Image: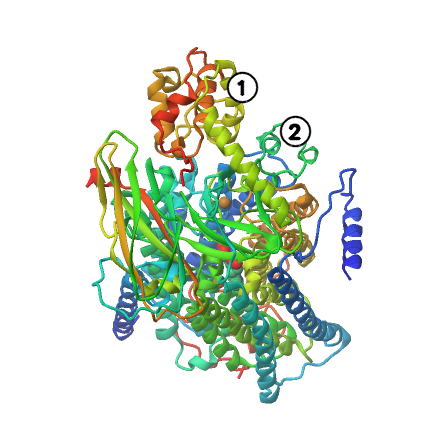
Amino acid sequence: MSAVAVENEHTHDAHGAEKGFLRWIVTTNHKDIGTMYLVFALIMFFVGGTMALIIRAELFEPGMQFVDPQFFNSMTTMHALVMVFGAVMPGFVGFANWMIPMMIGAPDMALPRMNNMSFWMLVAGMLLMASTLFMEGGAPAAGWTFYPPLVLQTGNALPFAVFAVHLLGISSIMGAINIIATILNMRAPKMTMMKMPLFVWTWLITGFLLIAIMPVFAGAVTMLLTDRFFDTSFFDAAGGGDPVLYQHIFWFFGHPEVYVMILPTFGIASTIIPVFARKPLFGYSSMVYATIAIAFLSFIVWAHHMFTVGMPIAGELFFMYTTMLIAIPTGVKVFNWTATMWKGSMTFETPMLFSIAFVVLFTMGGFTGVMMSLAPLDFQYHDTYFIVAHFHYTLVPASVFILMAGGYFWLPKWTGNMYDEKLATLHFWLSAISVNILFFPQHFLGLAGMPRRIPDYAVQFADWNMVSSIGAFIFGFSQLIFVYVVIKTIRGKNCEKATDEVWEDAHKHGLEWTLSSPVPYHTFATPPEKIPTEHL
Amino acid sequence: MSDNLAEKNKRLVRKLVIIVLLMFGFGYALVPIYDVFCDITGINGKTNKTAANEIVYKIDKNREITVEFMTALNESAPILFKSELKQIKVHPGQYYTVNFYAENKTNKPMVAQAIPSISPGLTAEYFIKTECFCFLEQTFKANEGRTMPVRFVIDPALPDKYRRITLAYTFFDNTEKSVKK
Amino acid sequence: MKKTKQLLAYLILMALGLRSAYASDYTLNLMKGVTKVSNDIYDLHMLVLWICVFIGIAVFGTMFYSIYHHRKSKGHKAEQFHENTTIEILWTIIPTLILIGMAIPATQTMLEMEDVKDSDMSIKITGWQWKWEYEYMSNGIHFFSSLDEKSNQARQLNSGINPRSVPHYLLNVDNPLVIPINTKIRFLFTAADVNHAWWVPELGWKKDAIPGFINESWTYVEKPGTYRGQCAELCGKDHGFMPIVIIAMEQVDYNVWVEEQLVSAKAAANSANKEWSQEELFAKGETIYANSCASCHMNDGAGMGATFPAITNSPIVTGDIDGQIKIVMNGQGMMPAFGTMLSAVDFAAVITYTRNGLGNSVGDFVQPSKIKSLLSAVPEDDD
Ligand code: HEM
Ligand SMILES: [Cu+2]
Ligand SMILES: [Cu+2]
């Protein structure tokens, strides 16, 4: 991003960026903070990815070759925590920081100083979490779900992991408050709610989800802490508590949490597809309502993660029906994206490729979701590799692919340089193929009876595990191409210059495309007069 | 930023922070809510935690329910714990007393808590105990053994489809915890 | 259909050059299982799977048609529609109807699974870190079931043993659960330490075992055979190493098995009274150690970090014998109390083994009869 900075220091001395390293520490500029979030997310993506490759290396063949089982469990736990709280969520916060003010015609986020604080708190939280790897007794190994009583057997790491969750929670809550305030208070006068781009809408709803659930999660882990150190018995049967209560509280947070990761994904996909179909988004208002419906439903389906815990039949059926309902608004979204492409004039630049792959592969995750929502079937599927396949389809070729898509989509606008389309296309095809080699066989494994979270397995699972591990390594190394392309684009040597519009007729789709490329350090000091209303 | 906007932001943030605090409270409120929910729906088969009054029911001689007794020890607590009977056939509405025996296998005093659980969970609300060693923590002297009665009745309102009920007790050794207190 | 899929999978694997000499038989789909419930689940699974496949073909087909035809490079001009109420209503209503169609059979199966009434026998199943405990409520048969010795050796880090040379690697136990066929069996689940989940795919379900609480489930197996499963809830270090094996047999064979069990339980109780030599106990102790202790203290007694101390040269093991017996009997920290888990003979054997093996050579040993007197808690059936 240095290109952006340099240019602005010449033109805008008074308001330009600080010089040097300090700029990044004290900055309150939404673009700088957005950049920091994105870089941090990318680094965490590789940290979490390395852990995943350790897991897949151990699972390459039956027998224990590389790690002991306790460390293996730490890896699955930390992999999930790093990916969820360090990569996917901060990635979307990064895009929110960069794009929301530009999309709604605001000069910056509503609360710039809080913005800076929430970023550094995230860094502190993740560092604290990572430091548990080096503690006596090892990092938490009870799964990212932290179920008691098992999690209470964690060594010295437990209180640190809990404080890390607190920090991450406070950071997300501050981020969410900031985003909500920006969207509700900072819009250009002509940017009415029903004219906002869907990315803005989905983030508004995600923001509300976050402030509703992060405090509940913070409460749950605090109860774990007091159970362990202060003799409370929230989850300890011996004192009249109940370990199942934890699972209810956790999933009251956990289910909406998975929507925190997917709603902004929907938003970016809904922003990209119309641009490359050269058509307005189909069913804008039904997209908005579907998002609201999904967010609402996500609060009343949590116990579908607990069908085998021994619920009364009425509970099983209630959570089965509500979970099935979610498929309806989700289906509406998929149909809308398809209809947006229908009779368009499509081109297939990398952001579009990733978005199409997202629609297809996310839908596959949705199908397995519907299958698992049927309680009797979940008595077989639950806690097997089938589940692992399901949520990875909804997270990797969905959320992660769309993070990549967003990167390719807006990078030319941010830097003023076009990325290398050839390498990017290669990155796409390698990722799209290997992600299926990686996760598709896991459906077979789960159905055939392989439980999840195990470091070694019976020999009849050997073949597909090997296939899956091969896919994992191809996928992992392919991501280095992305890093290379991004760095090359930022430096701008031998790159084509991007036009202001970047993509053909993009100015009809969003305010950000009406700005010059690269975007100036400060934008929309005065609100825009005209706003694109194509989607209406 | 105009003062007006700053003011607006401040008001909004205040409201959002209140939501956050309420939701934190809600997380804790889920604990009692869950207990109420368990009482209604019989999650985990939790039975009454304090002694019920002995009311007279109409005894239903035509129905016979098998009540099975199960004992368990958490983390192999050093306790010998048995029920005198494996199972008993009962009529709804009639009171019965059964005995359990527990013995402290250590040569130190011990504090232990028995946790009852009933299956099927939905029968818990019809399984009423007027006397039970699970209502309070039990203190044992070194190597002390003791017979402990449980007096119960099955509410005749129990739906017809239930013919067999299991009452399980798990003993937890709480000595360390109560020493800390 | 199944054949074609297997063939396809085989081809993919061949293409990847993976079908080596050790071809193992894998499956791609859920197993039908051996109970009515598991068959109902399978049928429902296939029904929903096919519905999803058809919806997938319709949606992706439309999308790919559009991707192929409505592209700029083919000169297709974009139309600018962005709404169509009829179609939007249609694609809300049709999925709703399909979902209702799935919910009806799913509800029926769910109700069937919950119906525990009229069972013929009850078995209590307790999950432990990291083994299962079975107790037949009617006849008092009671035993622990842990990973078999061969798998256990092969699964050690860099054991040098090829897992493929071990029969039923990781899916075999020392003492399987034996049940009669054509009998409605009720299982009662609980756990002694952390949550576990008991899962045998051929029965069609899994159920959580939770400390302090009981859960129940039932099965009615129609076909004799050996059915294997695993723990399905993360329960710590050796979660992957606590399999389940059920042997379902004809009622007459089952009765014979019960008789044998009762006789050998009596014999075990008696053998606790006889005088044992140090060598006899030492030999027996080796297997007990491997099954009950090695998962934490390691096979060679070297332990693992501060949580799992070494046995070799341990001041407790090489110190006063009564001190060691007390700790093993009552547990300490993460270590469970073995007093209620091992028989008096096994207990004396493992004490003897640890004091005189694994690099220790204290030289003394203890008689099972002494352990027995310390432990009237040994579950000896007296009623
Ligand atoms: C059509 C929509 C969906 C349905 C019906 C659905 C349904 C389910 C069900 C029933 C489970 C529990 C399975 C079990 O543990 O036995 C589950 C697990 C999971 N789902 Fe989904 N899901 C949907 C979409 C998503 C999305 C969009 C995401 C995330 C972006 C997601 C992420 C997850 C995760 C992470 C888990 C596993 C959590 C864990 O046990 O660690 N799902 N889903
Ligand atoms: Cu969920
Ligand atoms: Cu387990």
Which residue matches tag 2?
C161
Tell me which chain the residue with mark 2 is part of: C
User: Is residue A275 depicted above or below C26 in this figure?
Assistant: below
Q: Residues within 10 Å of mark 1 (few under 14, many from 20)?
A: some
Quadrant in the picture for residue A118? bottom left
- Which residue is at the front of the view, C51 or B153? B153
What is the image's colouring? rainbow
User: Is residue A462 depicted above or below A307 in this figure?
Assistant: above
Quadrant in the picture for residue C260? top right
Query: Which residue type carries mark 2?
Result: Ile
Does mark 1 have its CB less than 8 Å from ligand 3? no
Among the two numbered marks 1 and 2 on one chain, the one whose residue lies closer to the N terminus: 2
Work out which residue is located at the far bottom of the displayed protein and give it: C86
Does mark 2 have its CB less than 8 Å from ligand 3? no
User: Is residue A533 depicted above or below C4 in this figure?
Assistant: below
Q: Position of residue A350 (x, y in %)?
A: 65, 62
- Which residue is at the front of the view, B169 or A14? B169
- Which residue is at the front of the view, A129 or C53? C53
Which residue matches tag 1?
C283
Residue A128 as seen in the image, left or right of residue C17:
left
Q: Residues within 10 Å of mark 2 (few under 14, many from 20)?
A: some
Residue at image point 77% right, 54% down: C6
Which SS class for mark 1? helix
Tell me which chain the residue with mark 1 is part of: C
Q: Position of residue C113 (x, y in %)?
A: 53, 63
Residue A189 visible here: yes
Mark pair 1, 2: CA separation: 23 Å
